[in-house]
Amino acid sequence: MKKTVCIILTLCLLFAAAPAAMASGDVTVDSSWSVLVPESPTSYESFAAEKLASCLSEIFDAQISLTTSAQGSFIAIGSASGTDVSGVADNGYRIEVINGCVHINGTAQRGLQAGVYRFLEQFCSRKVYTSAITVMPKAQSIAVPAGTDIVYEPFFESTDTDWRSPHNTEYAMANGLTNGANRYIPAEMGGSVNYLGGFCHTIGGLCETASYKDSHPEYLALHDGERTVDQPCLTNPDVLAIATANVLAILRDRHDPNASLQIVSVTQNDNQNYCECENCAAFEAAHGGRHSATMVNFVNQIADAVAEAGYDNVAVDTFAYQYTQAAPQNIKPRDNVIIRICSIDCCQAHAFDADCNKEYLRDLEDWSKICGRIYTWDYATHFLHPCNVFPDFGRIQKNIQILYEHNVKGVFVEGNYFIDSCDTEFGELRAYMIAKCLQDPYCDLDSEIDGFLDAYYGPGGKYVRKVLDIYTKQSGSYDGHMNIWYGSWSCMRPISSLTAALINHYWKTAEELAETDQQLANLERSELSWRWWKANAGKSEFSFFSWNRADECEKLFDDLRAHGVTLLQEFTYENLDEIAPDVIRYAVPDRWHVGAEENESVAEMIKINKLAERFPPLFGLVAWIYNMTRS
Ligand SMILES: [Zn+2]
Ligand SMILES: [Zn+2]
């Protein structure tokens, strides 16, 4: 509600200010300006002022200096500014024109710096698209509307995705990624939201059940009539005391009172062997029959101990995952408890509000009724075949909007974290899209995508956009759905030969337009995912009716390697040198990671595809049907 009011107020201020801006014109910032800092700046103010001055110096090709004297024209930073941020939420900012000068102020640890990055982005057109591509046009001057009064409050307290560029500090600062799990942001730059201790599945470390197996079997979960070390019994008071002591020990060692937020994770082990003892069963029965009830009760008590010990910038995190995904009844997580809900079973062709994802949305809605601090763990890459096209572009923004509208306060979108071993698709684009939506779920994403494509692929970027639009339209298998474990060809609905030819044409045209070797390399690398899809689906040059299919498969494999691919699957660590030439030429790429000698169906596939190679007009249909039904 607060956010909505704030957006409305901001819009009102902007609209109300418009006539004044028209009347008095824009404020023109040029090389005669300076950056006004307080006499004794904080580390945040120093960083923000120096960042701004150095970027402006580069833009104007002139030295922009810092000053403590409010003379002439200046951009005032932090407490040197006259901007009131008392009503702005933590880590938010306000950018305002007052008496012909620009004022930027922010709240908590990161607000001011975020305000400076926003100023650079909005008024200087500075964009950090990847860790290697920053666009910052030179200018004689920049215009700031005289009525400017921008108020921003973070939509999420923690934002995170992985891939490659999001690990970069400058990229994270510019695009608003704040969690420390995948990046390092020094304290003097505002720091990050950090997990202390483990990131997930931590209960095994907080209460080492194996060490109590003989002395206290009652500490262990009773599952299927037997005590198991797989999970602890969450209603046993000694287990609670042990885990609480360990959480407090972590905090004694690593707590930072100056951090915006720190998190200790108390999360179930990664198995289904929850406790079914009499106490646990009775407690869960009294709370809607949900296994999450004992977990919330357990974590609430730890969270109380953390609060009582005075750690008021610490939250205790637990999962709503698998058997704990459904929310309990008659019990609520404490304010300093984070519920992290995971969408691993969701359809990736559709947003969370689609019918196919109704179970997830129901659980999210249930949790949002009792918990004001939900975090989510989402997925945005094809984990089974990461070389393939993963057409989830149409759901990214909608999903993040849905999360924001359901009280979600922290989002992690897991991408292809092994991208350095397998970069064939649109990893950098998708990471940018996610970061921008986490920064502002209602941003103009189309324009962000177009800007990225221009910068990353060059003049051919507009043809890549056409390709992406077709992929998005075709997203999902025959029934329109897909997830991160689908076979490659079934990630997109059947594509006609004509449409495939059109996509080929777009890629070729884009490549012809490339102006630099880097743009061409980016285009060829992203096209690999389309070639991978075609090779699995038997389309275009990879048709089973083509005399050259085997040669094209071999060429695809060579090109993948030439672009640095050393991994074909998330958990495959085979040496690509060891894949037999016949497997490369005659098996579909989805099966390349499986040696023919280890898999009878691959051996059979090789035989049939070899036969088709001899006379495709006759055997192509048999080969096509065989491959489609087995991959
Ligand atoms: Zn139990
Ligand atoms: Zn679906």
Image (cartoon, rainbow, N blue to C red):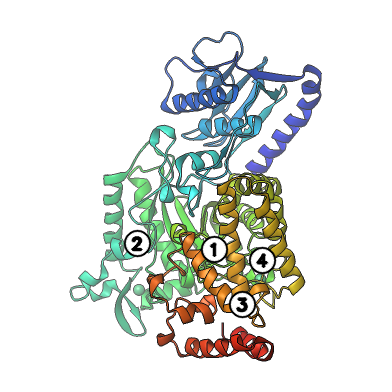
What percent of the width, then of the height, locates residue 245?
Answer: 27, 55
* Cα gap from disc 2 to disc 4, whole angstroms: 32 Å
* Cα gap from disc 1 to disc 4, whole angstroms: 14 Å
**First in sequence: mark 3 or mark 2?**
2
Q: 547 and 449: which one is in front? A: 547
* Cα gap from disc 4 to disc 3, whole angstroms: 36 Å
Q: Secondary structure at mark 4?
A: loop
Classify 607 as above or below 424. Answer: below
Q: Inspect the image, locate mark 2, and give the three-letter code of the amino acid beneath it.
A: Thr
Classify 593 as above or below 92. Answer: below
State the residue position of label 2: 202
* Cα gap from disc 3 to disc 2, whole angstroms: 52 Å
Q: Which mark is residue 350?
A: 4
Dot 4 and dot 3 residues touching (CB under 8 Å): no
Label 4 CB sits under 8 Å from any ligand 2 atom: yes
Q: Inspect the image, locate mark 4, and give the three-letter code of the amino acid beneath it.
A: His
Q: Inspect the image, locate mark 3, and give the three-letter code of the amino acid beneath it.
A: Asn
* Cα gap from disc 1 to disc 2, whole angstroms: 25 Å
State the residue position of label 3: 548
Q: Residues within 10 Å of mark 1 (few under 14, many from 20)?
A: many
What percent of the width, then of the height, locates residue 562?
Answer: 48, 61
Q: Quadrant of the C terminus?
A: bottom right
**First in sequence: mark 3 or mark 1?**
1
